[in-house]
């Protein structure tokens, strides 16, 4: 995991006071990080355009020009129809909080249309501190951000413009430059699979997940299949009537006495009346909730439980915010402030774990927050969310905490999709489940 920060000015000031650094020294290091990348990836005499603004970001760009001059063909003025091997955006750094003017937008549009490898210095120009983007934002192949990771780089909107992200050393190691943060970025190395180490065990050792089977039976089958693949010893689909399901899944009309967790909401519809749901949930088993349950009258009661994971997509989360009285907003307003609304919900319900779906997933509990940036467009397919619910339910059934279940289930979900080696439009839920087996 890596720390994420809303702003790093505080860290810069701390580095100056604690490590006797100066602003010019830190700028030299910032520029050197970009220069080192260019030297290692582009041959001498390549053409490099460095577009500078007036602030510190522009100063980084001017220092970079000095460091590269003589070995590279460096330009600092954009000219139409000119070939460049590399374009460095040093117009605006982090902290942008106002719309760009029309002249800057026109310049960025021209830069984006120019064929070159594009590097953003600190953050792409047009990316605001809150993670939103301007009408024209520099589309980088690589962002070299200064000192530490900014949270704005991992918003849903930013995913279109940041490219690969590297952190520049400013003259002091990250371990010394950074301080603890309540926001963390999840790395692939944080994945911890539910591998079995004990030899003397049986199926009951690994839990029993009950999946409530609603109107859309396929959603429950997908969730149950994913849970079984991810290590749960037993999976039962709970239905009012007998339905056709895969042989490896069991079927019941009530919650099994040895169930250790429940998955609820996937394809639920109106299959169960309120009294039936109340009876089925008259227990203290860990829950993973998704989809239709968020609009159910019972939802507010379920929120009072201590072991619960919510997995809404943005529209469902606006419904949650509305019924809890936190905010009455639409999806566009939510997407403009995903971080803020996630923090508000987790402050109001500190026992619940929130997993807010999106291009970059937000996971939160109380004052702890995590971003999973490893999702791909391949996951934009019906049934992907049911797989995720099954993975989280599987871990809950095996005894993982709600927070760890959400983190590990989300990582497995996204990394399995990332490893899909066929066309990105072709991933199906069962392709995804199959790839869970080889993580």
Image (spheres, rainbow, N blue to C red):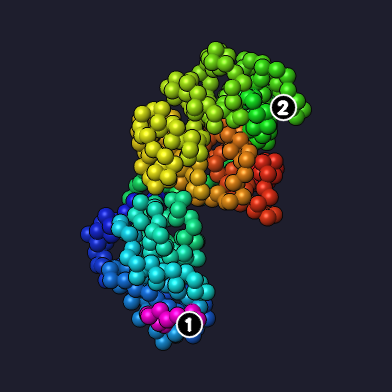
Total of numbered circles in the picture?
A: 2
Gap between marks 2 and 1 measured at Cα: 63 Å
Q: Quadrant of residue 242?
A: top right
Provide the major secondary structure of the magenta segment. loop
Foreground residue, 340 or 61? 340
- Viewer-nearest of discs 2 and 1: 1
* Depicted 163 relative to depicted 323: above or below: below
| Percent coordinates x, y for residue 1 in the rendering | 46, 48
Residue closest to the far left: 17
Q: Is mark 2 on a helix, strand or loop?
A: loop
Q: Which residue is drawn at 54% across and 32% down?
A: 291
Specify the farthest residue to the right: 247
Vertical comparison of 38 with 335: above or below? below
What residue do we see at 66% from left, 17% from top? Answer: 240
The magenta segment: 74-84
Residue neighbourhood size for the residue with mark 2, other residues' Cα within 10 Å, grouped as few (<14), some (14–19), many (≥20): some
Which percent across, then down, holds residue 411? 55, 44
Q: Where is residue 222 in the image (x, y as percent from the top left)?
A: 67, 34
Q: Quadrant of residue 326?
A: top left
Judging by the rendered image, the residue that carries numbered circle 2 is 249
Q: In what element is the residue under mark 1?
A: loop
| 2 or 1: tag closer to the N-terminus | 1
Is 348 magenta? The answer is no
Asked if the magenta segment contains residue 80, the reply would be yes
Instruction: Look at 49% across and 27% down and name the residue there.
Output: 295
Q: Few, some or many C-alpha atoms within 10 Å of disc 1 (few <14, some 14-19, many ≥20)?
A: few
Pointer 1 residue: 82
Could you tell me which residue is drawn at 46 percent across and 46 percent down?
Answer: 371
């Amino acid at each position: 995991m890596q720390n994420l920060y809303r702003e790093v000015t505080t860290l810069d000031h701390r580095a100056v006071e604690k490590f006797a650094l100066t602003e010019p020294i830190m700028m030299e290091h910032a520029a050197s990080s970009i220069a080192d990348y260019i030297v290692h990836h582009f041959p001498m005499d390549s053409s490099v355009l460095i577009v500078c603004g007036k602030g510190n970001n522009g100063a980084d760009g001017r220092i970079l020009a000095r460091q590269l001059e003589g070995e590279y063909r460096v330009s600092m003025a954009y000219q139409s129809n000119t070939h460049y091997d590399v374009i460095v955006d040093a117009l605006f750094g982090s902290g942008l909080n106002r719309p760009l003017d029309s002249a800057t937008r026109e310049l960025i549009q021209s830069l984006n249309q120019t064929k070159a490898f594009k590097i953003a210095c600190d953050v792409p120009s047009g990316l605001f501190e809150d993670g939103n983007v301007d009408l024209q934002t520099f589309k980088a192949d690589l962002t070299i951000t200064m000192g530490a990771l900014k949270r704005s780089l991992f918003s849903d909107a930013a995913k279109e413009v940041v490219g690969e992200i590297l952190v520049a050393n400013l003259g002091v190691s990250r371990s010394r430059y950074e301080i603890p943060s309540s926001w963390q970025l999840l790395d692939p190395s944080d994945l911890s699979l539910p591998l079995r180490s004990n030899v003397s065990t049986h199926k009951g050792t690994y839990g029993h997940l009950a999946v409530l089977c609603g109107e859309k039976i396929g959603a429950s089958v997908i969730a149950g299949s994913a849970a079984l693949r991810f290590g749960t010893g037993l999976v039962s689909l709970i239905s009012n009537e007998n339905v056709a399901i895969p042989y490896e899944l069991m079927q019941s009309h009530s919650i099994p006495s040895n169930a250790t967790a429940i998955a609820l909401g996937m394809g639920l519809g109106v299959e169960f009346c309120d009294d039936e749901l109340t009876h089925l949930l008259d227990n203290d088993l860990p829950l993973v909730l998704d989809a239709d349950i968020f609009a159910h009258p019972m939802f507010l009661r379920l929120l009072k439980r201590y072991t619960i994971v919510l997995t809404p997509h943005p529209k469902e989360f606006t419904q949650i915010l509305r019924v809890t009285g936190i905010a009455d907003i639409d999806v566009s307003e939510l997407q403009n402030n995903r971080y803020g609304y996630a923090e508000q919900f987790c402050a109001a319900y500190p026992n619940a774990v929130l997993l807010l779906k999106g291009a970059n997933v937000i996971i939160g509990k109380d004052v702890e927050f995590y971003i999973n940036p490893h999702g791909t467009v391949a996951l934009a397919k019906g049934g992907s969310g049911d797989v995720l619910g099954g993975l989280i339910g599987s871990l809950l059934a095996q005894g993982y905490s709600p927070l760890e279940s959400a983190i590990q289930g989300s990582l497995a979900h996204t990394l399995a999709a990332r490893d899909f080696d066929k066309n990105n439009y072709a991933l199906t839920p069962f392709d995804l489940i199959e790839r869970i087996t080889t993580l």
